[in-house]
Image (spheres, rainbow, N blue to C red):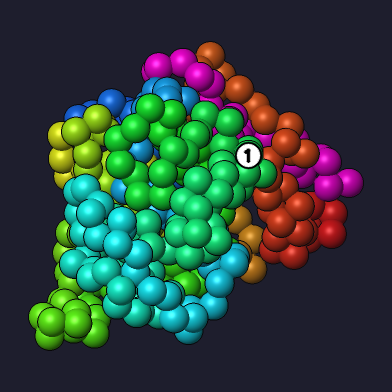
Amino acid sequence: MLAAAFASLALITSVLAPPVASQPVSLDATKPPKLTAERWIVYDADQDVVLASWNANDQAPMASVTKVMTSMIVLENEELTTVVTVPEFATRARGSTAGLVAGEQLTVGDLMIAMMVRSGNDASLTLAHHVGGGSVDAFVAQMNQKAADLGMTSTSFANPAGLDAEGHYSSARDLLTLIIAADEYPDIARLARIKLVTLPPDPNGKERVFTNTNQLLGAFPGNVGLKTGDTPWADKVLLGVTERAGRTIYSVVMHSDDHFADTREMVEWAYGTYSIQDRWLRPLYAEEGGGGTVASTLELTESHERRLRSMATLDDGRWRTSALEDLPKAEIIGRWIREAMPGVAGG
């Protein structure tokens, strides 16, 4: 039976739900990076595994990464082509703005660009006022309901822009949940990738050219978004998505001295960890020189085989064995093993 094959491949790390402790929990024995961020988490989206975290459940201000949730609510309720009139109160927004003028009309799509690329608080207030039927508070109530629906139990929204306010906070783990949820909205991914954009000029003829606040775009290999944040209470915050070498990494840093440097450090470390697939394959190899072989149907490259042989054996004193049914991708892994190694797995 398949169970016999799984038993021989059982040494899988139980990092799928890291504890609340302030010590990092990592997939590999190598130490996670030391960052300036007070709270962070890094996640392998392909394997559905948290690779490491630090104070990930602490509640803290989240700044403009709030706008990811704002975008989700807008997209659920309005078309991008709908024309919206900018209310006067929105033009008095504090912090980062897109230079909107009271009474001018822009499409929801243009306002979304102003909000996500320029991080315009005036754009987020305009959208919230429109979608909330003239009430920003009604829109914020939808944000909090969505957070509850997603299981973001450490999150509370007080405004759609991310301005510092009592009752406006989240956690690194909840913000990871937000990134995962945002993956279901292709328009958010599209906006997050925009490096430079030109919007229609304002009513006075002033041009509006915006550069994405995410300085990693085009500068850090594989980075495709997602959102920056920076306020006095929150300090620097960054939600990141990196796609490289067939592997997608999600990252969150909160209250950082340098959110870009911290994200680079964390993501580079993440790409140095081994995947769950590697962990399953490792027991099939003997130590170097031991003559270990594996079914040729796997078609692994020579470098991948060397990588597997170099993996250190996990210490039973540090790592627990996860039951197969507890792994999020157990069925996929099981099917892959049956197809790749019929003689071993009994398939």
Q: Please tell me which residue is depicted at 40% across the width and 17% down the height of the picture.
A: 22
User: Residue 102 in the image: x percent, y percent?
Assistant: 27, 69
Prevailing SS of the magenta stretch: loop
Q: Nearer the viewer, residue 190 or 26?
A: 190
- Where is mark 1, residue-wise? 148
User: Residue 287 in the image: x percent, y percent?
Assistant: 47, 39
Q: Nearer the viewer, residue 71 or 289?
A: 71
Q: Please tell me which residue is depicted at 22% across the width and 39% down the height of the picture.
A: 231
Q: Which residues are magenta?
A: 1-27
Q: Is residue 321 visible?
A: yes
Write down the quadrant of residue 98 in the picture.
bottom left
Looking at this view, name the residue that lies furthest to the right. Answer: 1
User: Residue 316 in the image: x percent, y percent?
Assistant: 56, 19
Amino acid type, residue under disc 1 in the picture:
Ala
Write down the quadrant of residue 188 in the picture.
bottom left
Q: Is residue 144 left or right of residue 120?
A: right
